[in-house]
Image (spheres, grey):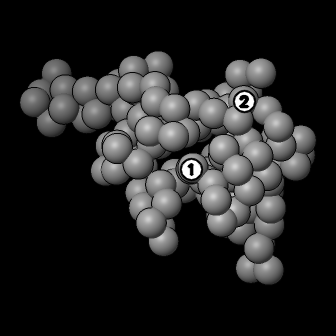
Amino acid sequence: MGFASALALAAVVFTSPAFAIVVSDQDAGKFVGQVVTVKGRVARVSTSSSGTTYLNFGAPHPNQTFSAVVPKKVVSHFTNLPAWEGKVLAVNGMVKVYRNKPEIVLDGPAQVKVEE
């Protein structure tokens, strides 16, 4: 295996949910720019007029501690998003900040695990 192949494999392995650091929704903002698994309870599931669905953790928008964002282009890959309201989820991905709130933009359901 060449160096480039080994590096690519390491990138996949160490950014997969099994190897990600697990943090609470309250602490997600401390991990901006990092791939982590954020765990917490979904307070509200809402869909914007543009078709983007937001899983707001901790409290409903605008007081959420963290959001998992499901863009319109991938919403169809998820089944029954409203059922996640009140559930504890583990969400894996790169933490970003939007309007001073931490979020992970989801590409697909493999990034989400229902914990409770």
Residue 109 lies in quadrant: top right
Q: Is residue 6 above or below residue 92?
A: above
Q: Earlier in the sequence, mark 1 or mark 2?
A: 1
Left or right: 103, with 71 as reference point: left
Residue 88 lies in quadrant: top right
Q: Residue furthest left?
A: 3
- Tell me residue 10's x, y (percent): 26, 27
Name which residue lies at 83% across and 43% down. 85
Q: Which residue is mark 1?
A: 66
Closer to the camera, 16 or 86?
86
Closer to the camera, 77 or 112?
112
Cβ atoms at labels 1 and 2 below 8 Å apart: no
- Tell me residue 114's x, y (percent): 73, 27
* Element on which disc 2 rests: strand
- Tell me residue 48's x, y (percent): 77, 73
Closer to the camera, 99 or 34?
99
Whether residue 71 is visible to the viewer of this picture, yes or no, is yes
Q: If the image is split into quadrants, where does the C terminus sit?
A: top right
Q: Which residue is mark 2?
A: 88
Q: Is residue 55 above or below residue 87?
A: below
Q: Amino acid at mark 1?
A: Phe
Name which residue lies at 51% across and 40% down. 26
Name which residue lies at 34% across and 43% down. 31
